[in-house]
Amino acid sequence: ALAAMREEVPALKAVAPIMAATDLYAVMFGREAGAAHVELIFRWSHLVMHLMSKPFGMLEAMFTFFHGTGTALRKAYRHSPLNEADTLYLVPNSEPLEWFRDGFAHPLGTEPFWDDKRHFVQFENMTSIPPVLLFCGWYDFFSAESCMYDWKAMRKLNEDCRMVIGPYTHWHVQAMQPKLWRTLLDFFDRHLLGDAAARELPSVDAFAMGHDMGWMQMADWPPPYTKEQKFGMIRGKDGDPNKLIDHNNSAIETFVESEISYVYDPSDP
């Protein structure tokens, strides 16, 4: 859907990317966190590039898809360095996966390798897009962070863009079905069939977490009543590395930024 929209094909009347994003670095490492999405990368590589290429591999792939298990995946999760896991466990007896190894070799996102991958769709260079429905999940590696950025960029080109954010992971295929199909049918009935009776979707339909849990409809994102706050571990002048500091507090001036590191051992997580 995103690739078709990028080409600005006049015949394209509406698109609905599901659990997708335009920033491929954010898919692999997150937009700001920088930690590799190992579970997503490994499971997707093993399912799509290995199991589904085998005779009757679909049956094995379906079991692995829903349960996230399997000897190869368990061994891969425990292996280091990460960029060796492709030919050892994920896609055995194959050539190395170039995108897999190159991605892990450039973890910062600022390397030239990512120049043509950080903006798969360059909205700033486009003149128009069709109506768009973005279906995202709060816990989805693909879209949790990038979905909102993509939606805001799309809205500058077409106000008829909708975004749904539910309490889903990337693998929550069954849990998202009722909401997904109702939303897709309403969206495409209106834009492809011209059905004026089809339910008009809100600009943003988000599942609120916490005390007042449930679906909320909004006209914009982020909601106007929200305030951004950033928290982080900062070493105080007294040397205590374990203080949780509110970056928005004026008292932050009394603290000195530093790094707090640890060693991750896949064999002993």
Image (spheres, helix red, strand yellow):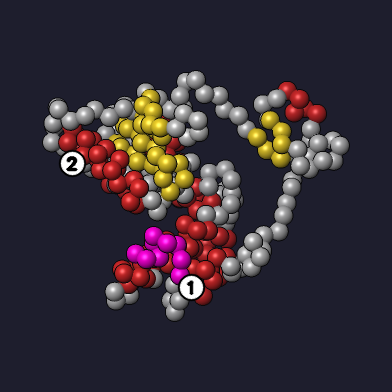
Residue 32 lies left or right of residue 149; in this view the side is right
Q: Residue 34: x percent and y percent?
A: 59, 49
Query: Can see residue 7?
Result: no
The number of discs equals: 2
Q: Is residue 120 magenta?
A: no
Q: Residue 234: x percent and y percent?
A: 74, 38
Magenta segment: 62-72
Residue of label 1: 71
- Residue at far top of view: 225
Mark toward the viewer: 2 or 1: 1
Q: Earlier in the sequence, mark 2 or mark 1?
A: 2
Q: Secondary structure at mark 1?
A: helix
Q: Residue at x 47, y 59 (%)?
A: 41
Q: Residue at x 34, y 45 (%)?
A: 176
In the image, 60 versus 36, the foreground residue is 60
Residue 11: assigned label: 2
For label 1, the crowd category at 10 Å Cα-Cα, with few meaning under 14, some 14 to 19 and many 20 or more, is few
Could you tell me the amino acid type at mark 2?
Ala
Q: Residue at x 86, y 37 (%)?
A: 238
In the image, 13 versus 61, the foreground residue is 61
In the image, 83 versus 260, the foreground residue is 260
Could you tell me the amino acid type at mark 1?
Thr
Residue 61: assigned label: none
Is 94 rendered above or below residue 178?
Answer: below
Q: Residue at x 68, y 30 (%)?
A: 247
Q: Residue 190: x percent and y percent?
A: 18, 32
Instruction: Specify the quadrant of the image occupied by residue 129.
Output: top left
Q: Secondary structure at mark 2?
A: loop
